[in-house]
Amino acid sequence: MPTRTARTAWNGTLQDGSGQVELSSSQLGTYQVSFPTRSADAANGNTSPEELLAAAHSACYAMQLSALIGEAGGNPESLEVTADVSLGPDPAGGFKLTGIALKVVGEVPGLDQAGFEKAADEAKAGCPVSKALTGVDITLETEYQS
């Protein structure tokens, strides 16, 4: 399996500095990061490690779920996955990820709601990004559309 690479160039202190995250493998873009926007409610045109992690988790989960739906005899006609990654204070000092909320809306002919929810739960446990984040509380909300 391939290895993917991203690179960050950072200048300055945590509070006053900023950086650029480059998606090196795909060459799809370079994005601005800074701690003040990372810890603020408004992103103001900057991304953050949490947003990038949310993107990775939602994509990984959607792929895993589509595979499991297919294995169960369903057709993943439409899956919309949202991942909300929260950052907060760590009682031990600094910051930590305080939770990830996954939400999936699926239109899956060939599976009933129970089958869809079973596949959704299995995907939450089985996607590689979920496996990498076992120290973070991950919740799942499903919406089945027939």
Image: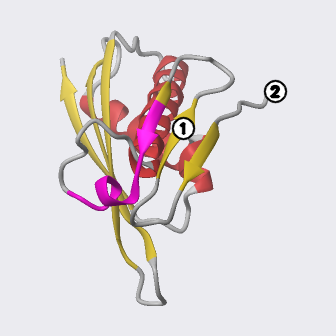
Residue carrying label 1: 21
What residue is shown at x 61% (from left), y 43% (from top)?
Answer: 9
* Image side of residue 9 versus residue 55, left or right: right
Q: Around disc 1, counting alpha carbons within 10 Å, would you say few (fewer than 14), some (14 to 19), or many (20 or more)?
A: some
Q: What is the quadrant of the N terminus in the image?
A: top right
- Position of 113 with respect to 111 (left or right) is left
Name the element at disc 1. Answer: strand
**Residue at the spot of label 2:** 1
Measured from the top left, where is residue 91 in percent x and y? 41, 89
Q: Quadrant of the C terminus?
A: top left
Q: Residues within 10 Å of mark 2 (few under 14, many from 20)?
A: few
- Identify the residue shown where x is 34% and y is 55%: 38
Q: Which mark is residue 135?
A: none
**Foreground pick, 124 / 10:** 10
What is the secondary structure assignment of the residue under circle 2? loop
Residue projecting furthest to the bottom:
92
Q: How far from the left and from the top, in percent, is residue 116?
A: 34, 31
Left/right of residue 74 with respect to residue 143 in the rendered view = right
The magenta stretch is 31-40
Q: Amino acid at mark 2?
A: Met
